[in-house]
Amino acid sequence: MLAAFVAIERRSASPLVRLGILRSGPLVRANLGALLFGGSFFGFQFLVVLYLQELRGWSSLQAALALLVVSIDAVLAPTLTPRLVNRFGNVRVIFGGLCLAAVAYALFLPVGLDWTYAAMFPSMVILGLAFSLAYGPLTIAATDGVAEEEQGLAGGLLYTSFQFGSALGLSAVTAVNVAATGSGGSLLTELDGFRAALVIPLAMAVVAAAVVASGLRGRGGAGAGLRHETPVTAESR
């Protein structure tokens, strides 16, 4: 289907996606970063909810309240993020956000059956900070340097990448979790499967950081067009 889409777009007089736009290095890096970050973010949240409800017996309301702190980005994105972008540049802020996401996932790797919420809290709050640093600036990077008449196309590509990455991340963590759990049925076996699946969000965040870091060399981390900045928060999820 992808090959057919490319073939049709190349021959169309008015393509839905002008393939030449993909020659933009910043745009491609932003889309890859969004795909991987979206996959890690939603994959991790799915696993946490699974852990809290299936392994710990928490209610839906308790699980929701446990994840509430991740929404700290609704406060930080419009206040802290613009200042950091103006000072350090768009790419550096995105890179910092992705690194924080990797730290949040890594801190959750040794999770046990008797973890208190205090042990989970650092991962939650760091992930909220990571989202506030990465998501909004990614929308800027994806449209930076793109012609005015193709700003809508660039934005559509970014959100498609984010949504596709989310689906990919959910599929990957589910597959690994099921494969690693097997048919044992015990809580310890389920915990082992959960820990194995947690490696997926961590790996996706690390790869996303590496992709974005490749843009630091060419641009020195400076973000052009910051006057257009409108940080995007978790409300747009």
Image (cartoon, grey):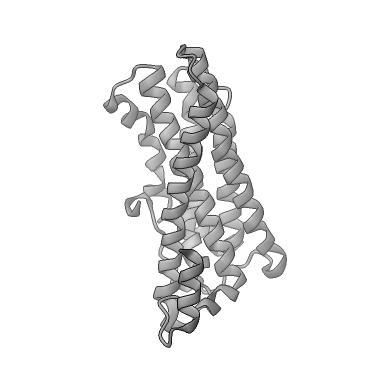
Q: Is residue 131 visible?
A: no
Residue 95: give x, y in percent of width and height: 60, 53
Nearest the camera: 213 or 83? 213
Tell me: residue 195, above or below residue 126.
Answer: above
Query: Is residue 214 shown above or below 124?
Result: below
User: Residue 88 appears at what percent x and percent y?
Assistant: 61, 60
User: Residue 166: x percent and y percent?
Assistant: 44, 48
- For the point 46% across and 59% down, the residue is 161
Rendered residue at 45%/17% (across/down) = 116
Left or right of residue 25: residue 177: left
Q: Nearer the viewer, residue 87 or 230?
A: 230
The residue lying furthest to the right in this view is 217
Where residue 216 appears, as percent x and y from the top left, is 68, 62
Above or below 212: residue 50: above
Left or right of 34? Residue 52 is left
Q: What residue do we see at 51% from left, 33% from top?
A: 123
Q: Is residue 231 above or below residue 98?
A: below
Q: Quadrant of the N terminus?
A: bottom left
Q: Quadrant of residue 109?
A: top right
